Image: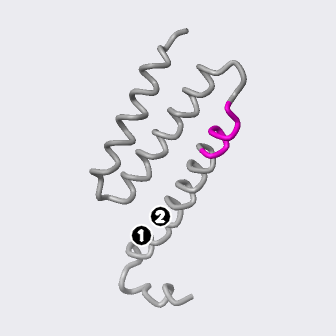
Amino acid sequence: MIINPEIVVFAALALNTTTYLILNQVLLRLVILVNSTLYIIYYAMVADTPPWTALVFSALTVLANLIGLTALAFRDSERRVSAEHSDLRTV
């Protein structure tokens, strides 16, 4: 194998631990996206037959975080509306 599966799972575990220290919600969600992706890669590397339950829940974690990031982006985009166009916020 090109990448040792132990390195992949170690990186995923290290990121998982790091998430407890992150206060910024956007950064937290991005780290969790990378973390979940590393777990999916790890599961694909080590199993002869894929652990479908783990893969599905990791994929759902990715999807939930993408939805959360999208919601955050829309919430924060309201702040970018200038004062002269503030009437657009009520639409």
Q: Is residue 38 left or right of residue 25?
A: right
The x and y percentages for residue 41 are 57, 28
Residue drawn where x is 59% and y is 20% of the image: 45
Q: 10 Å neighbourhood of mark 2: few (<14), some, or many (≥20)?
A: few
* In magenta stretch: residue 46: no
SS at mark 1?
A: helix
The x and y percentages for residue 26 are 39, 56
Q: Which residue is mark 1?
A: 76
- Residue type at mark 1: give it: Asp
Q: Nearer the viewer, residue 44 or 63?
A: 44
**Where 40 sits versus 1, above or below?**
below
Q: Main secondary structure of the magenta part?
A: helix
- Residue type at mark 2: give it: Ala
Q: Which residue is mark 2?
A: 73
Examine the image and state in which quarter residue 58 appears.
top right
Residue drawn where x is 44% and y is 85% of the image: 85
The x and y percentages for residue 86 are 43, 87
**Where 29 sits versus 42, above or below?**
below
Query: What color scheme is it?
Result: one colour
Give the quarter of the figure containing the C terminus: bottom right
Magenta stretch bounds: 51-57
Report if the CB atoms under discs 1 and 2 are less than 8 Å apart: yes
